[in-house]
């Protein structure tokens, strides 16, 4: 047989029949379907694990090969999942240290205090009650450095990057704050637990003053109040932060720099009203006594305001507020209003801080407006001044309260706490004629009984009942509101 004939016979033997061809096609189709299902399952799985992968499916294999720094995504968020980046300076640390130590918990909280230079000799013996310190990186050799308008603010902004570079593991949230910011940790954990930490979140709040927001942005987290960044967001921002600074050397403020850079990355602000910039001056007791119905997360500008408790210095006053904060942060500064009908009194309790008694029955909608005991951050600002309504004290005995501040707290029973508030000073006004001339002048203290269990009902404040007032003391008990209960 010739080679040509042999080749012909060989090819003829390998020619498939119609039935074998159909079987082969079916096999290929089934194999393809199985591969498609396998790919779909793999893609969906990785997408659910990584917020970046869900946006860039063609990079899934690369992303999934990276080590996962957050292995415990299925467990509830707790304080160990937060890392704090605090900005301070050697010059002011001795003065600001009590503010940070009022909320910092050694061996519990994780984070760092970033200083502008190495501590001086008097600070070398670093207190174990303070966060460990780091020194910010030197950027003076940058080519763009001569064009940077505010190097100090760039240092503050870059603290985000330098905190991330510390390499802490199992991080869900980075909390950035100043050294005169007081934070409330249990409330922070509670609030951040609402959010999916595997997504891109930038959480904070605006300034209290209209002009501060107008000059910068109404959609920006003001940095002194503190703000929270989810791990994936900081991970992404870390790759672009320095480049963003170099693109924008003209920006003045660190929090504005962050806002601009995150806008370039397509991330906008999620607002939580419990972060307080306190762009206010003077006595902020009117603001704190009618705190918004949100968990308090922070207080800033402690040195720009009067001590929040009378007859105390600033650090003593902050420590006084931290006493009830250590017992029940969920109820701290939450306003509860009830009425003493026999005497025509309205009683407003800001738990753990103050109590007001009015010689008249006043609507809750009125009492929830803060008394304007303070002034705006910019002294020449024109109305409207604030992002919230206020009321002015005009010497009217029917609308000016008798004011009592927290004096002490103790266990009333196994299930109840009693907080005692004492009169700050005499009101110096006659009784309210509209209220029947039942003056609260003889009252020197108010006792508030509250359940030990945490106040967790969302969207509604607690109710209260006046128990008695004998001689110089009025007693009030907080309780859950009943279904459909109207307080008017």
Image (cartoon, rainbow, N blue to C red):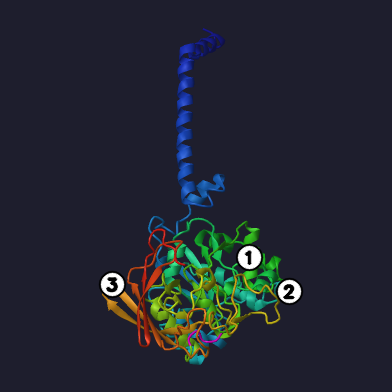
User: Where 374 falls versus 272 (above or below)?
Assistant: below
Q: Residue at x 38, y 58 (%)?
A: 75
Q: Check disc 2: other Cα within 10 Å, few if <14, some if 14-19, many if 20+.
A: few
Judge whether residue 119 can be spotted in this image. Answer: no
- Residue beneath label 2, please? 147
Q: Residue at x 51, y 70 (%)?
A: 363
Q: Which residues are magenta?
A: 305-309
As drawn, the residue found furthest toward the left would be: 414
User: Where 140 falls versus 161 (above or below)?
Assistant: below
Asked whether disc 3 touches disc 2, contact meaning CB atoms under 8 Å apart, the reply is no
Looking at the image, tell me whether mark 3 or mark 2 is earlier in sequence order. Answer: 2
Instruction: Tell me residue 293's x, y (percent).
Output: 49, 67
User: Where 366 falls versus 63 (above or below)?
Assistant: below
Of marks 3 and 1, the one in the foreground: 3
Residue closest to the eye, 419 or 401: 401
As drawn, the residue found furthest toward the top would be: 1
Count of picture labels = 3
- Residue beneath label 3, please? 415
Secondary structure beneath dot 3 equals loop
Instruction: Tell me residue 195's x, y (percent).
Output: 48, 58
């Amino acid at each position: 047989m010739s080679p040509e004939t042999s080749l012909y016979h060989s090819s003829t033997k390998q020619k498939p029949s119609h039935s074998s061809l159909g079987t082969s096609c079916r096999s290929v189709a089934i194999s393809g379907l199985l591969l498609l299902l396998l790919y779909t399952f793999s893609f969906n799985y990785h997408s659910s694990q990584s917020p970046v992968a869900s946006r860039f499916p063609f990079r899934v294999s690369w992303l999934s090969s990276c080590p996962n720094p957050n292995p415990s995504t299925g467990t509830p968020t707790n304080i160990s999942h937060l890392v704090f980046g605090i900005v301070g300076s050697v010059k002011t640390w001795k003065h600001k240290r009590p503010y940070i130590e009022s909320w910092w918990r050694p061996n519990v909280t994780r984070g760092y205090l970033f200083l502008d230079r190495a501590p001086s000799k008097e600070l070398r013996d670093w207190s174990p009650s303070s966060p460990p310190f780091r020194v910010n990186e030197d950027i003076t050799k940058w080519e763009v450095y001569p064009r940077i308008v505010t190097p100090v603010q760039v240092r503050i902004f870059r603290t985000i990057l330098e905190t991330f570079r510390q390499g802490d593991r199992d991080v869900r949230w980075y909390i950035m704050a100043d050294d005169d910011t007081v934070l409330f940790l249990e409330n922070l954990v509670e609030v951040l637990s609402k959010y999916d930490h595997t997504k891109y979140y930038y959480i904070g709040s605006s300034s209290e003053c209209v002009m501060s927001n107008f000059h910068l942005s109404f959609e920006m987290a003001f940095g002194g109040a503190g703000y929270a960044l989810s791990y994936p967001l900081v991970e992404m921002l870390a790759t672009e932060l320095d480049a963003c600074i170099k693109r924008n050397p003209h920006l003045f403020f660190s929090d504005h720099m962050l806002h601009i850079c995150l806008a370039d990355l397509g991330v906008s602000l999620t607002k939580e009203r419990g972060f307080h910039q306190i762009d206010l001056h003077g006595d902020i007791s009117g603001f704190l006594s009618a705190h918004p119905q949100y968990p308090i997360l922070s207080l800033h500008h402690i040195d720009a305001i009067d001590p929040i408790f009378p007859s105390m210095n600033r650090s003593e006053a902050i420590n006084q507020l931290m006493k009830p904060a250590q017992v029940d942060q969920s109820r701290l500064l939450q306003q509860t209003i009830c009425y003493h009908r026999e005497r025509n009194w309205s009683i407003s309790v800001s738990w753990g801080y103050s109590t007001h008694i009015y010689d008249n029955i006043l609507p809750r909608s009125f009492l929830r407006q803060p008394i304007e005991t303070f002034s705006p951050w910019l002294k020449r600002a024109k109305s409207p001044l604030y992002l919230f309504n206020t009321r002015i004290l005009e010497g009217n005995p029917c609308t000016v309260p008798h004011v009592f501040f927290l004096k002490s707290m103790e266990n009333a029973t196994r299930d109840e706490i009693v907080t005692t508030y004492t009169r700050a000073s005499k009101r110096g006004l006659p009784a309210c004629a509209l209220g029947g001339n039942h003056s609260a002048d003889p009252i020197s203290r108010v006792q508030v009984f509250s359940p030990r269990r945490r106040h967790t009902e969302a969207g509604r404040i607690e109710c209260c009942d006046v128990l008695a007032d004998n001689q110089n003391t009025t007693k009030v008990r907080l309780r859950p509101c009943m279904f459909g209960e109207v307080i008017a």
